[in-house]
Each structure stands twice: as structure tokens, then as C-alpha cells.
Image (cartoon, rainbow, N blue to C red):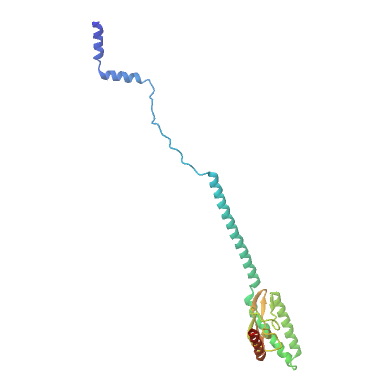
Amino acid sequence: MAKSRKKAGKKSDQNPAEVLEQTETMEEGEPEVIVEPEVIAEPEPELPNEIDVAKDEARKNWDLYLRERADLENFRKRSQRDKEDALRYGNDRLLKEMIPVLDNLERAVDHAGQNANDDQGLLEGVNMTIIQFRKALDDFGVKPITAIGEAFDPNRHQAMGQIETAEQVPNTVVTEFQKGYMLHDRLLRPSMVMVAKAPAEESTNQNSEESEGHAE
């Protein structure tokens, strides 16, 4: 027993540093275990329905496409109309300058016809020139406006005054000072005209009859 106590005493007298070194030596052969901290997963946010979002986006894109296509079609039609107008009315200024020449030729013919002593050959030559001139204008779409005997139209006629007459219905063109012309469906120059109106006596009687009718 005494020996056992001595051995125990020797063992207890061992240096603590040596004990730690022995412990580390024993643990060198074992793999090191790393304990990771536990991660708590956060709940995922609720996402909108992706199909509905895609449908809304597709609908918006389709509406945008339709509007852009309509704008493009309107632009194409407008450009085509402008192009056609440029071709139809591009000679507007030239034709306006040519018409007075025709006016002078017609006046010359009228004056020559009133004088029997004038050269008949000259008269026929001028008439032929007028016919050719009218044909050239007609080829460009220029046509004279019919005025005498027609009802006064402010869109085609320019009234220079009024004439009292019982032979024509009031507001009827009775005299034409200068011919008017249309370029296709556009007014090139209005006709200068005189317009009929009822005589003063007839107008007074008509007003009296209307007054009596109202009185009754």
C-alpha cells in the first residue's frame, strides 16, 4: 500500500504543462470538428401571379402597337393625298398667268367681229389660237365656270353689282364681265358677274302682300 501511495504521489506531482502537452498529443490524430452557427431561414415574400403580370404587359404592348400602326397609316394616307394634290395643283400659278392671255384673245375676237372691215383671216387665226389655248388648259384640268343663267354661287361667282329685272329670277347671274375657271375641283378664279334682283315696284308689292298676310 505504501508503494501504491508513493506511485500516486509521484503521479499527482506531474507538471500541469506536461499533462496539457500529452493531451494535445493525443488529440492530434483526431479530425477537427467545426460547428457552424444555425441559420434561421426567413420566410419568402409573396410574389404576384406572374401569368397575370405577363398578360397585362402583353395587352399594353398590343394596344401600343395598334396605336402606332394607326398613326402610321394616317401618315401614309396624308402623304399620299399631299402628293396627289401636288401633282394636280402644282401648275396653279402658271395657269393663273396663262388665263389673262386667253381673255385678251377672246376680247380681240369679239372686237373684230363687231367691225366688218377687219381682216377676216386675222380673225380666223385668233379663233384657232383660242381653241388651242382652251384645249391646253383643258388638258391641265382647267375648265370654265358656267355663270350666265345660273343661280349666284359665292363659292364660284364674284358679284360686281345687281341689276333690276323682271325677266330673271332674283339672285340669278345675268351678266358676266370675266370668266371664272376651276382647276379640277378647286376654284382657280371666280367669275365676275352681275346678279338680278326684283324691280323696286314688284318688291314693294311683294312686301305689302307679306305684311297683309301677317296681319290676317
Tally the marks. 0
Does 17 appear above or below 189?
Answer: above
Q: Quadrant of the N terminus?
A: top left
Q: Residue at x 56, y 50 (%)?
A: 58
Q: Residue 78: where, in percent of width, then height?
A: 61, 65
Rendering quarter of residue 128: bottom right
Q: Quadrant of the C terminus?
A: bottom right
Q: Nearer the viewer, residue 172 or 28?
A: 172
Q: Name the residue rendered at 74%, 85% in the picture.
A: 125
Relative side of 140 to 48, left or right? right
- In this view, which residue lies farthest toward the bottom? 117
- Work out whether residue 77 or residue 140 is closer to the camera in this orientation and state it: 77
Residue at 66 percent of width and 91 percent of height: 201
Residue 191 appears at what percent x and percent y? Answer: 66, 82
- The quarter holding residue 170 reads bottom right
Q: Position of residue 37 (x, y in %)?
A: 38, 31
